[in-house]
Image (cartoon, rainbow, N blue to C red):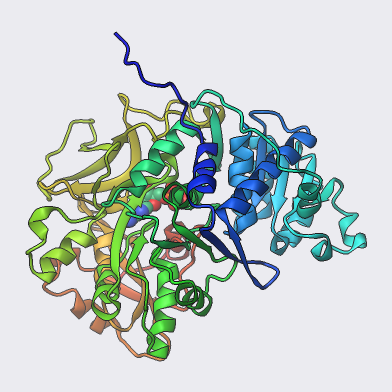
């Protein structure tokens, strides 16, 4: 017997329809590449998203066609999020921090038909325009006055102006209804090993992920909040916040290219931001700025941090010095991205600050909808005892089944997706990533988790950033080498740093050596590139060797 409730497909367009009807005057504020602060509302944004849908039809974009973006977080990008997916086409958010060759590879692989870009990426557009195979139109996301001069424009055949395209449309457009399993958007993994692979989300997976992300123990955002996603809209859909904000009627504050401490702080304070989200490296810049100026956060109450391990020292600083609660979250492109969030359970309420910090420092417990387990090399389940660590596998309705165009074969193992992360899980269900499997340090047949070592190092007051990598060792095969970037103007020695590990970990986990570097290479999504460091130090001779 079937239930007798309405069959309404879960479609992304319904989010902006809802926001227009129920939160029409709620603001979307953007720092534009033109330099100013732009203000709009969900009502106006919904109108312009419909104009986008009409403009795409006028460009002969068909359902299923890929429309790419190379853009910062801003209202025009958001209009494309809804206009493209809502009309049945597929939004493909390209990462502008990639090398032009990679952009060409990905755009060709995705068979993008249209590419919409912020003018700050005009040099990149000129570098790739003659080389892609399928792009018919290049749309500059600006007005006529800010278009490139004619001599430059002539170098990009098919160049169009976004505001001109919208001006031709009246916005009288009905969002189409279709199967909720239809593809909505496409993101490529960063391809640190091998070619990038496409992850194709559906309307259904996106909507279910949005509901879950909004839950109080996940990102926990409501109509009275003002949300600032520092995480780029080209990095796994800004962790769903572009969908979540209109769903709940939150104000949205979009930082554009201004990701330095000062620009972020001004927006956070100026717009009364209550919740923000980003990777640890951007918060380092912000905290350095706030520290230096003796400033405070007057409205921010919560910051979601993930994408790479958030050092406990950062969680503690946010809480003790700035009264900002950190929600440490974990996920990946293949998971839309959210998998776990480190929210408390009832038993933690009365615990000591140290015990609570230990909970907050884990990557968190599974959000409803995500199932997880850790397994040994033979695929057998490992216990959740907080000790055993193994390969982390996940499954759920917003987790990948296969890569775009079947790339890489079947990624699943017995219906579970192997994340490539190594983790342990406590009896209470809190998961802690110890490493990515390719970063694990194998010392005498045992594994040393580099993230634990980095977290300790980053609590040292003189350390700005630290990466722990495997260095070759004649007896133990591999031993940890700690690569440290110091804070400016401070002095610290190798011995100081090594002494800092005493009593915090098993002695044999202590790094064998410390090297100081001017900078640690970061990838396109703000993560430490250990591959590059391993390359740099591949001939390094440890003093213990
Ligand atoms: P890529 O880094 O390849 O661009 P993703 O952005 O999808 O891909 O990153 C996913 C990976 O980032 C995870 O598999 C995990 O290794 C790492 N990661 C994400 N969040 C966290 C976290 N809170 N702590 C530790 N690692 C994390």
Q: Residue at horizontal 68%, vertical 53%?
A: 100
Image position, residue 212 (x, y; %)? 34, 43
Which image quadrant for residue 209? Answer: top left
Q: Where 322 sits versus 194, above or below?
A: below
Q: Where 535 sits versus 333, above or below?
A: below
Foreground of the two, 281 or 247: 247
Quarter of the picture holding the N terminus: top left
Asked if residue 314 shows in the view, the reply is yes
Q: Where 46 sits versus 402, above or below?
A: below
Q: Where 407 sits versus 252, above or below?
A: above
| 163 left or right of 441 in image | right
Q: Residue at horizontal 19%, vertical 74%?
A: 501
Image position, residue 416 (x, y; %)? 31, 30
Residue located farthest toward the top when viewing the structure as drawn: 1
Image position, residue 150 (x, y; %)? 92, 60
Foreground of the two, 476 or 72: 72
Q: Residue at horizontal 45%, vertical 38%?
A: 206
| 514 left or right of 334 in image | left
Image position, residue 89 (x, y; %)? 63, 33
Which image quadrant for residue 174? Answer: top right
Which image quadrant for residue 304? Answer: bottom left
Foreground of the two, 433 or 395: 395
Quarter of the picture holding the C terminus: bottom left
Foreground of the two, 400 or 438: 400
Asked if residue 438 shows in the view, the reply is no
| 349 left or right of 330 in image | left
Q: How many numbered marks have been drawn onto this rendered protein structure?
A: 0
């Amino acid at each position: 017997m079937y239930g007798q409730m309405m069959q309404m497909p879960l479609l992304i367009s319904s989010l902006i329809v809802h926001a227009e009807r129920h939160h029409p005057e709620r603001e979307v504020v953007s720092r534009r590449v033109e330099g100013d602060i732009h203000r709009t509302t969900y009502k106006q944004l919904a109108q312009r998203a419909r104009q986008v849908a009409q403009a795409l039809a006028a460009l002969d974009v068909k359902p299923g066609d890929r429309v790419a973006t190379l853009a910062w977080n801003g209202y025009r990008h958001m209009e494309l999020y809804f206009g493209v997916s809502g009309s049945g086409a597929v939004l493909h958010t390209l990462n502008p921090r990639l090398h032009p060759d990679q952009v060409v590879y990905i755009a060709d692989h995705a068979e993008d038909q249209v590419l919409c870009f912020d003018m700050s990426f005009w040099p990149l557009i000129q570098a790739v325009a003659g080389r892609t195979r399928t792009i018919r139109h290049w749309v500059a996301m600006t007005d006529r006055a800010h278009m490139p001069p004619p001599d430059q424009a002539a170098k990009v055949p098919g160049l169009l102006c976004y505001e001109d395209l919208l001006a031709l449309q009246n916005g009288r457009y009905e969002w189409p209804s279709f199967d909720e399993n239809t593809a909505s958007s496409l993101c490529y993994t960063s391809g640190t090993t091998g070619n990038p692979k496409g992850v194709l989300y559906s309307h259904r997976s996106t909507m279910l992920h949005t509901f879950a992300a909004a839950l109080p123990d996940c990102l926990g955002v409501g109509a009275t909040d003002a949300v600032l996603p520092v995480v780029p809209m080209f990095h796994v859909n800004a962790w769903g916040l572009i969908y979540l904000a209109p769903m709940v009627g939150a104000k949205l504050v979009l930082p554009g290219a201004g990701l330095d401490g000062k620009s972020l702080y001004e927006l956070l304070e100026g717009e009364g931001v209550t919740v923000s989200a980003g990777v640890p490296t951007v918060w380092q810049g912000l905290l350095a700025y706030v520290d230096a100026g003796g400033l405070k956060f007057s409205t921010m109450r919560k910051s979601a941090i993930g994408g790479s391990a958030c050092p406990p020292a950062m969680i503690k600083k946010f809480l003790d010095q700035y009264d900002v609660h950190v929600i440490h979250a974990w996920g990946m492109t293949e998971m839309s991205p959210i998998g776990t969030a480190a929210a408390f359970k009832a038993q933690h309420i009365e615990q000591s600050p140290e015990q609570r910090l230990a909970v907050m420092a884990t990557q968190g417990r599974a959000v409803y909808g995500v199932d997880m387990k850790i397994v040994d090399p033979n695929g057998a389940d490992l216990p959740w005892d907080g000790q055993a660590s193994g390969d982390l596998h996940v499954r759920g309705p917003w987790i990948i089944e296969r890569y775009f165009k079947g790339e890489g074969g079947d990624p699943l193992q017995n219906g579970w997706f192997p994340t490539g992360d190594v983790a342990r899980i406590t009896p209470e269900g809190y998961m802690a990533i110890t490493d990515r499997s390719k970063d694990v340090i194998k010392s005498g047949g045992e594994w040393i988790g580099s993230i634990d070592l980095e977290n300790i190092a980053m609590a040292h007051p003189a350390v700005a950033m630290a990466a722990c990598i495997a260095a070759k060792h004649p007896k133990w095969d591999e031993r940890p080498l700690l690569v440290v970037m110091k804070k400016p103007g401070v002095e610290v020695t190798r011995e100081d740093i090594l002494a800092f590990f005493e009593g915090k970990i098993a002695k044999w986990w202590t790094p064998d050596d410390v090297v100081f570097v001017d900078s640690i290479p970061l990838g396109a999504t703000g993560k430490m590139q250990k591959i590059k460091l391993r390359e740099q130090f591949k001939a390094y001779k440890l003093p213990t060797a």
